[in-house]
Image (tube, rainbow, N blue to C red):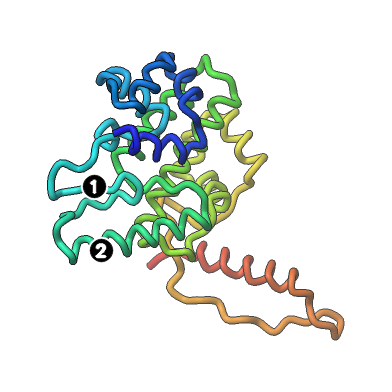
């Protein structure tokens, strides 16, 4: 159990002493857990799971054939070769997506837990603007994760920063935010077309072809061509879906 806990702790970049401070659980509890003398009770495990954005269940090794990966979120039969291969393929895609896009919450229960906690913060009038903005960005990170998951972790998905800008321009999302939070996030990320409703980004079916561009008889620089292609991609993404 302690080894599995370490996996989630290390992913957050914490040490036992950090988790102890954030949860109020004595450091001796972690020492005893590590040595095998005892393990935290359910109440303490719940506090630890909250800090590490995971579930108590994932501190225990799977006890049956049906297993849910705490990272990519796939539930599969751990004794079936076909299911094992399916998990390996999806997990690999999830890992590649994390390398490109940053944290991706692939596990549904964990994602919903994070969303609920942060929505309580962003909706709390007594919280500072910075706290509310940070909480809303975590909610958006969860929505972003779900959007990428829906594509099968396709690396052609827009980046998190682009996704946030698209959601701020989304008439079903941006106007629902606290005005101060909206303006603060808008000043940092701007707004972009691409998600007119809902929370999913749909990767365009067609790929834009390279264009021949010239300026005063001279070729554009590679940086300018890249900006032109990025602008084309955003225009295509903003087209109404039939």
Q: Residue at x 38, y 68 (%)?
A: 242
**Which one is nearer the viewer's eye here, 78 or 94?**
78
Rendering coords of residue 2 (x, y %): 33, 32
Query: Where 231 sits versus 191, above or below?
Result: below
Circle 1 sits on which residue? 68
Q: CA distance from mark 2 to mark 1?
A: 13 Å
Which residue in the rendered view is the most extreme toward the right?
216
| Element type where label 1 sits in the image | strand
Query: Where 237 sits versus 145, above or below?
Result: below
Q: Residue at x 14, y 61 (%)?
A: 80
Rendering coords of residue 232 (x, y %): 60, 70
Q: How many marks?
A: 2
Rendering coords of residue 187 (x, y %): 67, 40
Q: Quadrant of residue 151?
A: bottom left
Mark 1 Cα-neighbour bin, 10 Å: few <14, some 14–19, many ≥20:
some
Rendering coords of residue 107 (x, y %): 32, 45
Q: Quadrant of residue 60?
A: top left
Query: Where 156 sits versus 173, above or below?
Result: below
Q: Residue at x 42, y 64 (%)?
A: 154
**Which one is nearer the viewer's eye here, 127 or 101?**
101
Q: Viewed as shown, does residue 211 lie left or right of 95?
A: right
Q: Residue at x 41, y 49 (%)?
A: 145
Q: Viewed as shown, does residue 63 lie left or right of 146?
A: left
User: Disc 2 or 1, which lies upstream in sequence?
Assistant: 1
**Which one is nearer the viewer's eye here, 92 or 17?**
17
Q: Quadrant of the N terminus?
A: top left
- Tell me if label 2 and label 1 are in contact, CB under 8 Å: no
Circle 2 sits on which residue? 86
Q: Viewed as shown, does residue 128 lie left or right of 187?
A: left
**Which one is nearer the viewer's eye here, 106 or 208?**
106
Query: Where 152 sits versus 6, above or below?
Result: below
């Amino acid at each position: 159990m302690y080894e599995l806990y370490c996996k989630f702790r290390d992913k957050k970049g914490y040490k036992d002493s950090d988790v102890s401070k954030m949860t109020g659980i004595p450091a001796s509890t972690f020492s005893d857990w590590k040595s095998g003398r005892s393990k935290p009770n359910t109440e303490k495990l719940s506090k630890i799971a909250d800090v590490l954005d995971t579930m108590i269940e994932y501190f225990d090794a799977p006890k049956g054939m049906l297993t849910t990966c705490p990272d990519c979120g796939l539930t599969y039969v751990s004794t079936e070769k076909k299911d094992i291969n399916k998990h390996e393929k999806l997990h690999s895609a999830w890992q590649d997506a994390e390398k490109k896009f940053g944290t991706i919450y692939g596990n549904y229960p964990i994602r919903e837990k994070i969303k609920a906690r942060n929505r309580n913060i962003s909706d709390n009038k007594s919280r500072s603007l910075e706290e509310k903005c940070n909480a809303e960005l975590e909610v958006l990170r969860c929505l972003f994760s779900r959007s990428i998951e829906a594509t099968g972790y396709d690396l052609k998905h827009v980046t998190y920063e682009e996704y946030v800008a698209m959601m701020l321009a989304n008439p079903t999302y941006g106007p629902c935010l606290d005005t101060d939070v909206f303006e603060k996030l808008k000043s940092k990320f701007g707004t972009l077309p691409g998600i007119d409703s809902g929370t999913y980004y749909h990767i365009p079916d067609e790929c834009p072809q390279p264009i021949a561009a010239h300026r005063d008889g001279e070729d554009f620089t590679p940086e300018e061509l890249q900006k032109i292609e990025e602008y084309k991609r955003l225009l295509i993404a903003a087209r109404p879906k039939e």
